[in-house]
Amino acid sequence: MPVFTLNWGRQRPAIKKYYRYEYIFVMSEEHTFISTILNDIEACEKPFTEAEIRKYLIEHLYTLPPDISEIEEKELKYEILAFSFIWEKINGSGRGSPRFAPKEDESSATLGLDEFKSTHVNDEVLGYWRSRTGKTKNMIMKSRYADLVWSFSRNLGKPADPDMARIAVDSILEVAKTRRYPSDEYITSKLKRALSLSLSVKDFNRFGKTIDLMFVIEGSLTDMPNYYMDIIDSIRSASG
């Protein structure tokens, strides 16, 4: 677990007592409330996980300014919702649909986070995540937003945009190549998700790049379903 630091700035000492954690994200004093939070996360130099992003976002529900706009409050909740999903794993492949799985902790119970559920993903939420996909420069966040748009579109009766799946894959590959991830176990699970997404859009070029990176990180391919191995053999045969 990374060592967290939190710079409260000048205007928040009165509420510091509510925080039981220290954070890797350093709080700035610029822009709007939600954009400041997101900028602080993106400016973080240490690798972090989606769970750490979610925890940081939830803690800010304690500090909503009295003059916060309805739109900003919605956006904060959309961000929390985005980082409150995990993907069901099938035979270690990373395949499957996003499942709402908030961490059960005291802060969740206190804040009544039962309001954040997968059934609350609607066109407005999806549009916000798509917008964030284009705005964020953080690859972990970008992969999460893009993957959610791809995964939830059909649930809302919309065609799934293959570009969202490709953006998610490319973002995961960038995280792996730059080694900005907290552990090998973490990035391996993400690369398996990238394999699944690549196959979903029949993008064998990205599938091959993902396999190459898995070899670099792990030295071998382990816990891989047979159908993945068959595809790898086919790619190798086609390439001579």
Image (spheres, rainbow, N blue to C red):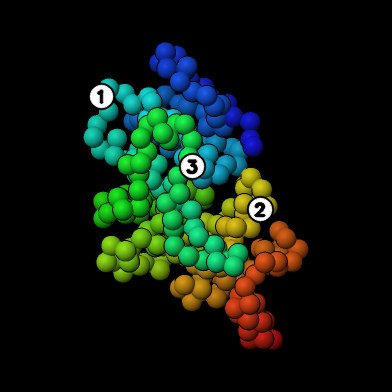
The dot on residue 185 is: 2
Looking at the rendered structure, the kind of residue marked 1 is: Asp
**Which of the two discs, 3 and 1, sits closer to the camera?**
3
| CB-based contact (under 8 Å), mark 2 and mark 1 | no
Mark 3 or mark 1: whose residue is earlier in sequence:
1
For numbered disc 2, what is the local secondary structure?
Answer: helix
Residue 161, given in percent of the width and then of the height, sits at 36, 67
| CB-based contact (under 8 Å), mark 2 and mark 3 | no
Residue 11, given in percent of the width and then of the height, sits at 40, 16
| Residue count near mark 3 (Cα–Cα under 10 Å), binned few <14, some 14–19, many ≥20 | few
Q: Residue furthest left?
A: 70
Quadrant into which the C terminus falls: bottom right
Q: Residue at x 57, y 32 (%)?
A: 24
Q: Which residue is disc 1 drawn over?
A: 67
**Which of the two discs, 2 and 1, sits closer to the camera?**
2
- Quarter where residue 75 is shown: top left
The front one of 91 and 14 is 91
Mark 2 or mark 3: whose residue is earlier in sequence:
3
For numbered disc 1, what is the local secondary structure?
Answer: loop
Residue 74, given in percent of the width and then of the height, sits at 29, 39
The dot on residue 103 is: 3
Q: Residue at x 56, y 26 (%)?
A: 22
Question: Between marks 2 and 3, how big is the CA–CA gap?
Answer: 19 Å
Q: Residue at x 47, y 72 (%)?
A: 200
Residue 118, given in percent of the width and then of the height, sits at 35, 52
Q: Residue at x 70, y 66 (%)?
A: 222
- Quarter where residue 91 is shown: bottom right
Looking at the rendered structure, the kind of residue marked 3 is: Lys
